[in-house]
Structure formats: C-alpha cells, structure tokens
Image (spheres, rainbow, N blue to C red):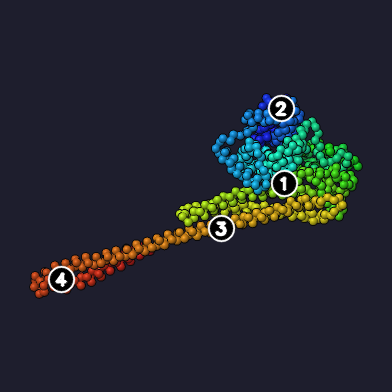
C-alpha cells in the first residue's frame, strides 16, 4: 500500500497519526514539511495541497484517498483494521510513548514550558476559555508553542504550517483568529488547547475532528476526499444556474525575499492555456494574457502591490453560449503557496437573480447591496474572516470591470485588516509581558528604596529606562500600524460611499455592515492600546523621576560631605602653614641673634663698644625677629609668584 503522512514537526495530532500507524505495524513514509527547505518544501506543500485541497496537517494518503487530521475511525476503515474499544486504544497510545514527539526532560525546555503554561493561564482568563483537562495533550501543545516561539520569535500554532514571516503567520499566532469560532462551534480550538463547557461535559454532538477554518475545508466533520474525485473550483455555484462571467481571485502576501514568485506563477498559469510567453502583455506592476477556448474567453491577470499580489482568472461566455459554474476554471493550474491571503469568486449569472437563486449561489451568511442606483452585489461568507468568499454581481456589463476592481480592493483591504488585527494582538501580548516585568520591578523598588545604595538605584534606573524604551518602541510600531489601518479603513469607507448602498428588498444586511463592523473596531482598539501605554509610561516616568531625584540627593549629600571634609582639611593645612611660618621666623631669629652675638663679642673684645653682650643681644631681639619675618614674607611671595607663572 502507498501510505504517506504529510506532517509538521510541532503538531501533536501528527504525532498521534504516526503513533497509530506504528502501533498497528503499518509501513508509511513521513514527510515533515516544516523541516524541509527551498524547493523541497514547496514541492511537498503542492503535493499535499493536490491531495487534500487545503493546507491543513496532518494529511494521511492511503492508496488514492486522503484523511485530514487524526480521524481514527476513518483510518481504521481505510487500513481495514479491527475495531477496538476507544479506551483500550487510548491506553495503548499512552503506553507506546511516542505521541509526545518531543522530550520535556531537558532543563531549558521545562523552563520554557513552565513560562508557556503561565502565559496560557493568563490568556485563558482574559478570553474566558477553559483549558483542556487532558494534561498530556496540553503538555504536547505547550512544547510545540515553546519550540515555535524559539524558532520564529512568536507563538505560531504548532498544528499549522508557519512561514517564519510574521506578516504571513499573524492569523495563526496562538490564540489564533479562528479560536473563538472553533470553541463556540466545535467545542475546542483547532489544537484542542482551549475548550468549551460542552467539550468538558463530553457532548456527543461535537465532531471528532475539527476542520481548519483557515482553509475553508470542504471536508467538514472529517470526511475523507478521494484524489480521483473532481473537486469543483467554484463550490458555491449550483450546476443548474448558468453564468455569463466567472472570476476567481487569489491573493498572496508579497514576499520581498522571493519577488519573482508572482511572475513565475503567472507564467505557469498562462502555460496551462497553451499560450506563448510572447503574447503576454507586461506592464510595470501588472501582466495579462487571454485566450478563447470552446466558446469561453479566458483572461489571466497578475497585479502586484506593495503588500499583496493577486492572480485574477476571468472566464467570459462568447457566442451566446453560457458557462457551467462548476468546471470552467479547473483546467487552469493555480499556484499554491503557504503565504496565501485570500481566495474569492465573483460570478455574473445569465439573468437577473432572485432570492432563491442566491440561496443556491451563496453560502449561508448572505449580504446584499444595491449600488450606483442600478447594480446589485450579493456576497456570501461561509465562515467570517477566513478569506474564501463569493460575490454575485448583477448581469450588466456596463460597469462590470469597475465593480470587480472595487470588490477585489474591498477583499484585499479587509484581509489585510485581519492581518493588522493579529499584529495588534501580538502588540498586546508584548505589552502584557512587559507590564508584568515592570510591575514586578516597581514592587521591588518600593520595598527596598529607603535603604538602597546609589549603585542599586542606578541599576534600577538603567533597567527601567530600557523598559521605557521598549514600551516606546511598541507605541511607535503600533502608531505606524494604526495609520496603515486607518488608511485601509478609509479606502473601504470611500468605496461604500461611492456605491451608495440601498435596500433592494431582499431582507439581507448591507455588505458594508459586515466589512466595516470589523474595520472600524480595530482603530478603536489601537486607541485603547495607546491609552494603556500612556498610563504605563506616566507611572514609569514618575518612578524614574523619583529614582533620579533620590540619586541626585544622595550625590548632593555626598558632595556636601566631601566639601565639608575639604574645608576641614584646608583649615588644618592653613594652621599648619601658619605654624611652619612662625617656627621659620623663630629659627631665623635665633640664628640671626646668634650671629649678631659673634659680631658684638668681637667688637667688645676690641673695646669698640662698651656694652655688655647680654644687653646688646636683648636689644637686637626685636630687630632679628623683624628681619626674619620680612625674609619669610618675601620668600612666600616669591614661591607663590613662580607657581602662578608655571600654571599659566
């Protein structure tokens, strides 16, 4: 048997599939997509997509049939395995010891998992989720999250294929954009980390396998898809309604690292129509090629903008022969990449449609807008915000190109706003972590401030200054993101204003209600984020100012103490100097009087004077002191003058 498992290294459901196959001795080939590189990874992704028509993992291929996710009953059926009780199988899986996939014994990994668990508890509390009671499943998911955070720098969903580029993965950063809807509808998120009360109560109505809302899977409920089975390109279109025009638009995030990817994909699509490269019309940021086949005109367009590039496949009826909506685009090979942003269909029926037609053409969430006082656009969304929508346009060719262009602009900007929403969530996550660190520091500072040394205060000040810089970085990035958000929102508003939407009597909500509901709230959320950031910055500024004041006061006190010490030293030096000067005068006077005594003694011996030696010395004492003082004073002035001259 040809059995292949396309998987991700961090996905615990992929581990369970491989464990199941190993337990039952099934030979299979494992393709770990995220560990492949370059062309090998692209080939594996295209292979997996060709088999499953989506990018969810694991994909288990068994002799022409594939199963999405860990669908045990379907795997048993395809592998012709005997049925066993679920409890015995669960015990076997635990005893086998492979499902974990990644060892948690390493010290660093245990520490990372511990931090991830603390983060999980905070997220569950803030979003009102319940955490899965199966500790083993939770541990496996946390290990995968920790590994992805180390690998990519953010908590990419371990059960989905991440690109390593934040702008492409922002909708699958845990908790992902689809978490709330999955928990509400299926009782648990795609990974089964966050669950609802229904899941805790083991509600039998909940599905065994959770389809990936990111992929708009047509295999809801775990239904396997045969490779040989034809999967319709426009799944929403009923076969009995013929079309004048059918357009498929696929948008991808622009990958600067591989800017030739869009052109290569366009050329592959053109070659599927057997067209020559020479007939392609190239412009600066667009390309177009057309060909008529069997009363159908095919037009393939490529448009590249700063953030997104789109492929547009248009099928127009010619010679009065209308189109079958289910099969017209299958012959064109559409490239599939992991940076896909959205996919939508724009269809023009052969005649004016009724409300009953819309129920056949559109998914269950329907919106209607009468535009430009004449035309109509109906829209259907199977699941909000998952990027695969259907638009029905009234059958009038006069303004078709303009309306199509505006719908594509709406779809592109709406999906980019979903990306911006994930960036906002990531900014909030960063701010939560930073605020927790700052609050902890502030608590320590307030407890130890009175008895802290200047070195400790300077360390706190340096750390808080760095944190203040980090918060300023988050604020600056968020402000830039908010400006982009407001620009996209204004583009959407301008289109709806030009349309002049009115109620056409279909009793469906206006299309602007669906799109602007999501676009308008994001700007308000950014404003609340800035208010929160400003509050934290004010508290930090006050604390930083207080620390600086405390340090300045301590330094000032130390400076005063040093000044007092220097004054005392100066006074002591002056006293010593005066003492030395006095002693110098005394010594000079003593030697002067002694010398005078020798002279006077000679004069007395020569009978030149007739005064006793003692009397003469007594008379000369004041004169000697005066001479000594004068000489000392002159020497002091001379030394001072020379010192001043040298300093100059």
* Mark nearer the viewer, 1 or 3: 3
Residue pointed to by mark 1 = 308
Distance from disc 3 to disc 4, alpha carbons, whole Å, reads 81 Å
- Residue 593 in picture, x, y percent from top left: 17, 68
Distance from disc 2 to disc 4, alpha carbons, whole Å, reads 135 Å
Extreme-right residue of the structure: 320
Q: Residue at x 63, y 37 (%)?
A: 135
Q: Would you call the spot at circle 4 few (<14 residues within 10 Å), some (14-19), or many (20 or more)?
A: some
Q: Residue at x 81, y 43 (%)?
A: 363
Q: Would you call the spot at circle 3 few (<14 residues within 10 Å), some (14-19), or many (20 or more)?
A: some
Instruction: Specify the quadrant of the image occupied by residue 260.
Output: top right
Distance from disc 2 to disc 3, alpha carbons, whole Å, reads 65 Å
Q: Which mark is residue 541?
A: 3
Residue pointed to by mark 4 = 617
Query: In the image shown, does 386 or 325 lie closer to the viewer?
Result: 386
Residue pointed to by mark 2 = 84
Q: Residue at x 79, y 49 (%)?
A: 407
**Quadrant position of the C terminus in the picture:** bottom left
């Amino acid at each position: 048997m040809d059995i292949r498992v396309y998987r991700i290294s961090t996905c615990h459901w992929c581990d369970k599939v491989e464990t199941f196959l190993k337990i039952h001795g099934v030979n299979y080939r494992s393709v770990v997509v995220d560990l492949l590189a370059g062309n090998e990874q692209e080939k594996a992704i295209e292979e997996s997509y060709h088999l499953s028509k989506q990018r969810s993992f694991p994909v288990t291929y068994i002799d022409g049939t594939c199963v999405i996710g860990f669908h045990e009953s379907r795997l048993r059926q395809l592998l012709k395995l005997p049925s066993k009780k679920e409890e015995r199988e669960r015990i076997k899986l635990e005893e086998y010891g492979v499902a974990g996939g990644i060892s948690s014994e390493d010290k660093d990994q245990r520490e990372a998992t511990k931090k991830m668990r603390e983060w999980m508890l905070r997220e569950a509390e803030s979003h009102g989720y319940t955490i899965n009671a199966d500790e083993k499943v939770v541990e496996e998911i946390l290990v995968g999250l920790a590994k992805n955070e180390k690998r990519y720098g953010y908590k990419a969903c371990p059960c989905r294929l991440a690109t390593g580029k934040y702008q492409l993965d922002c909708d699958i950063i845990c908790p992902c954009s689809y978490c709330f809807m999955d928990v509400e509808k299926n009782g648990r998120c795609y990974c089964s980390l966050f669950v609802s009360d229904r899941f805790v109560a083991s509600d039998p109505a909940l599905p065994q396998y959770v389809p990936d809302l990111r992929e708009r899977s047509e295999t809801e409920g775990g239904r396997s898809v045969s490779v040989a089975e034809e999967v319709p390109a426009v799944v929403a279109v009923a076969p009995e309604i013929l079309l004048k025009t059918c357009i498929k638009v696929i948008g991808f995030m622009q990958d600067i690292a591989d800017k030739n990817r869009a052109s290569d994909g366009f050329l592959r699509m053109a070659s599927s129509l057997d067209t020559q490269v020479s007939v392609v019309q190239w412009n600066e940021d667009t390309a177009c090629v057309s060909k008529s086949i069997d009363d159908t005109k095919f037009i393939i367009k490529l448009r590249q903008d700063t953030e997104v590039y789109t492929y547009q496949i248009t099928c127009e009826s010619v010679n009065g022969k209308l189109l079958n909506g289910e099969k017209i685009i299958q012959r064109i090979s559409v490239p599939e990449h992991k940076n896909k942003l959205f996919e939508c269909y724009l269809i023009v029926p052969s005649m004016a449609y009724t409300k009953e037609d819309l129920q056949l053409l559109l998914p269950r969430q329907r919106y209607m807008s009468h535009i430009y006082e004449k035309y109509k656009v109906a829209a259907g969304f199977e699941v909000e915000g998952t990027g695969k929508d259907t638009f029905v346009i009234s059958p009038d060719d006069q303004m078709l190109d303009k309306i199509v262009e505006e719908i594509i602009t709406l779809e592109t900007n709406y999906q980019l706003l979903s990306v911006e929403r994930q960036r906002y969530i990531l900014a909030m996550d960063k701010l939560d972590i930073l605020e927790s660190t700052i609050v902890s520091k502030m608590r320590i500072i307030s407890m130890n401030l009175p008895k802290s040394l200047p070195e400790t205060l300077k360390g706190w000040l340096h750390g808080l200054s760095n944190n203040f810089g980090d918060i300023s970085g988050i604020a600056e990035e968020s402000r830039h993101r908010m400006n982009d958000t407001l620009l996209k929102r204004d583009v959407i508003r301008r289109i709806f204003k030009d349309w002049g939407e009115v109620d056409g009597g279909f009793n469906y909500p206006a299309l602007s209600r669906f799109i602007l509901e999501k676009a308008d709230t994001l700007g308000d959320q950014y404003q609340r984020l800035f208010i929160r950031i400003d509050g934290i910055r004010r508290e930090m500024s006050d604390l930083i100012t207080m620390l600086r004041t405390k340090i300045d006061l301590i330094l000032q006190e130390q400076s005063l103490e040093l000044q007092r010490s220097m004054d005392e030293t100066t006074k002591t030096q002056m006293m010593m100097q005066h003492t030395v000067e006095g002693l110098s005068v005394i010594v000079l006077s003593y030697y002067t009087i002694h010398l005078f005594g020798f002279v006077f003694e000679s004069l007395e011996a020569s009978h030149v004077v007739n005064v006793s030696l003692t009397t003469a010395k007594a008379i000369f004492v004041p004169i000697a002191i005066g001479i000594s003082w004068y000489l000392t004073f002159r020497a002091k002035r001379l030394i001072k003058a020379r010192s001043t001259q040298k300093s100059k």
